[in-house]
Image: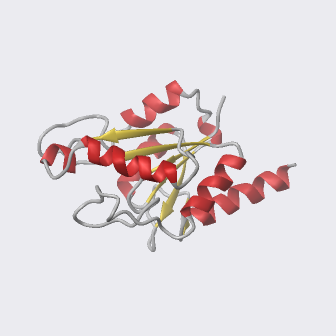
Amino acid sequence: MNKCIFLDRDGVINKDYVDYVYTIEKFQFLDRVPEALRKLKEAGYLLIVITNQSGIVKGTFKAEDVMLVHDHVQKHTDNALDDIYIAPYHEKWTNSLTRKPDSLMLERAIAKYNVDISQSWMVGDKQRDLIPGKKLGLQTCLIAEETCPEADIRVDGLIDLAEKLVEEKAEAV
C-alpha cells in the first residue's frame, strides 16, 4: 500500500485569490512549496491534488486553463505531483459528490493508488478541504492562521508539514 499527501491547491500550493487562479501570470507558489513537495516525495509519499475549480462551470475559465496552471506547477517542481483531481462544479448548478466537502475525488484516488489511509494526510487551507479527509480516516493538516475541529494539526505552510513528517520518519529508523 502507498502513503499519500492529498493537497488542496489554492491556499496550499499557491497564493489564493478571491477571483480564482487560472493563468500562469497570476500563479504564485507559496513560500517554499517546491522544496516541501521535494521533501515529501523523498520521504516516499504520493502527492495528489484534490481541488474544487468552480470557475469552470461558472464560465470564468476553461478546464484547459486549469491544466496549463498544473503543467506550470509540474514544470517547476520536477513533476512532483502524481495526479490531479478537479471538481469543476458549483453547488448553485449541481450537487456533485466530487466537490469538497464531499469525498468522491478522495475515494477515487485512494482506490486507484492503493492508498494506506493510516499513513496518509489531507492538507487544506479551509475546513471544507479537511472534512472529506476526516470522513475517510485520513490525518488532516490545516494551513491557516486559525484552526478548525477537523484539523489534527495546524501549520503555517506546507514546508512545516514536510519537515515534521521527514523528522518523524528519521526518528522511526
Q: Residue at x 61, y 64 (%)?
A: 159
Query: Where is 76 relative to 87, above or below?
Result: below
Q: Residue at x 46, y 59 (%)?
A: 13
* Residue 102, x across and y down, in percent: 33, 40
* Residue 23, x across and y down, in percent: 30, 57
In the image, is 32 to the left or to the right of 169?
left
**Residue most extreme to the right:** 173
Q: Quadrant of residue 158?
A: bottom right
| Count of numbered marks | 0
Query: Where is 24 relative to 42, above or below?
Result: below
Q: Quadrant of residue 1?
A: top right
* Residue 17, x across and y down, in percent: 29, 67
Q: Residue at x 45, y 74 (%)?
A: 145
**Residue most extreme to the bottom:** 145
Query: Could one spot residue 8 in this view of the protein?
Result: no
Foreground pick, 53 / 104: 53
* Residue 45, x across and y down, in percent: 64, 43
Q: Residue at x 49, y 61 (%)?
A: 142
Foreground pick, 21 / 124: 21
Foreground pick, 79 / 151: 79
